[in-house]
Image (cartoon, rainbow, N blue to C red):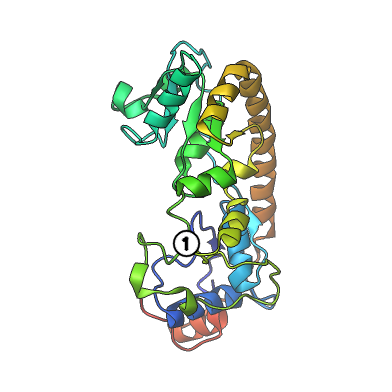
């Protein structure tokens, strides 16, 4: 910003969080657009932690955010051994004690005379360590959001993951933390009609905030992390889950995920270095007062108060 600092916007969730009125959202969008103007003395960047938010930002702002994926590669990668020592198949999110859908998995296993057992990490271990997770063959993931650090951690560990296909995940109504108008955030204080219209630079056929249209929900869920990352297995029913668990070579999947993690870490390092290289290191002209500073950055004389 004009106070001798570069801004890197990097939301790993909807960039509009805590803006629960149309004027607040409009002002935020304007601030983002103004901050990356080409005539800025300093270079500022709009980035994002996932493909979903990259498309979400484009939909409302028209800006092409740099994809700098949220990950756990610098603390959870290459620090464990994939032993498959435990017989239980874990059920995630890992912070859940006993997911209500575990009974459906158990019933499907029984119907197919399968010996698979399902358990949560919290029930087995309470406070668990990464190696304890890596001792399991696989995780059945029942995601409530389109991006989470728990998923990135599992991927960095190389634990084979099984996720419901989009049709099935919509049928189960699992992803309840996706939009600004979800009950977690603005809820009843913000309605779909209050949201800004689609930016002309965006060409998505549906709004990401549409929670009524099945077509819109299906369309936007394709950008969730677990449908973007390779080697995550999908299943169309509980019976199909048991069938896939029975036929999957977990070691092969783990090895493929490991190789993908190596590739992603190299690519992500290059992306960050590319951003850093674009930051102007020349001496900067620092405004002498606050009003001049916000005028240069936001092209306005007054900032909104949250």
Q: As rendered, which of 282 and 9 lies closer to the eye?
A: 9
Q: As rendered, which of 126 and 173 lies closer to the eye?
A: 173
Q: As rendered, which of 34 and 145 lies closer to the eye?
A: 145
Left or right: 54 in relation to 82:
right
Quadrant location, the C terminus: bottom left
Residue 213: x and y in percent read 55, 64
* Secondary structure found at label 1: loop
The answer to whether any part of residue 283 appears in the image is no
Please name the residue shown 37% across and 29% down the image.
103
Point out the residue furthest to the front here: 111
Asked if residue 16 is positioned above or below residue 300 in the image, the reply reads above
**Residue identifier under label 1:** 179
Please name the residue shown 70% across and 52% down the image.
274
Please name the residue shown 64% across and 76% down the image.
199
Quadrant location, the N terminus: bottom right
Residue 113: x and y in percent read 48, 14
Q: Quadrant of residue 245?
A: top right
The answer to whether any part of residue 11 appears in the image is yes
Residue 10: x and y in percent read 54, 58
Residue 246: x and y in percent read 58, 17
């Amino acid at each position: 910003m004009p106070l001798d600092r570069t801004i890197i916007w990097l939301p790993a969730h909807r960039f509009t969080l805590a803006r629960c009125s149309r004027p607040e959202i409009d002002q935020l969008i304007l601030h983002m657009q103004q901050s990356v103007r080409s005539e800025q003395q300093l270079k500022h960047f709009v980035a994002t932690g996932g493909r979903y938010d990259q498309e979400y930002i484009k939909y409302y702002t028209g800006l092409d955010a740099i994809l700098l994926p949220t990950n756990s590669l610098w603390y959870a990668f290459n620090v464990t051994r994939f032993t498959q020592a435990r017989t239980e198949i874990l059920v995630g999110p890992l912070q859940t004690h006993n997911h209500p859908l575990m009974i459906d998995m158990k019933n499907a296993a029984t119907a197919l005379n399968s010996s698979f057992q399902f358990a949560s990490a919290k029930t087995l271990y309470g406070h668990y360590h990464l190696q304890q997770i890596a001792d399991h063959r696989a995780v059945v993931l029942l995601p409530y959001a389109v991006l989470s650090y728990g998923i990135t951690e599992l991927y960095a560990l190389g634990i084979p993951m099984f996720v419901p296909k989009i049709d099935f995940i919509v049928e189960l109504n699992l992803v309840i933390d996706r939009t600004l108008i979800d009950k977690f955030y603005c809820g009843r204080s913000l309605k779909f009609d209050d949201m800004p219209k689609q930016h002309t630079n965006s060409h998505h056929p549906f709004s990401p905030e549409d929670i009524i249209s099945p077509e819109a929900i299906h369309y936007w869920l394709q950008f969730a992390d677990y449908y973007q990352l390779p080697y995550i297995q999908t299943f169309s029913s509980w019976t199909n889950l048991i069938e896939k668990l029975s036929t999957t070579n977990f070691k092969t999947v783990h090895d493929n995920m490991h190789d993908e993690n190596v590739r992603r870490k190299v690519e992500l390092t290059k992306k960050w270095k590319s951003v850093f290289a674009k930051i102007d290191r020349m001496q900067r002209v620092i405004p002498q007062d606050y009003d001049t500073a916000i005028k240069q950055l936001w092209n306005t004389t007054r900032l909104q108060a949250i």
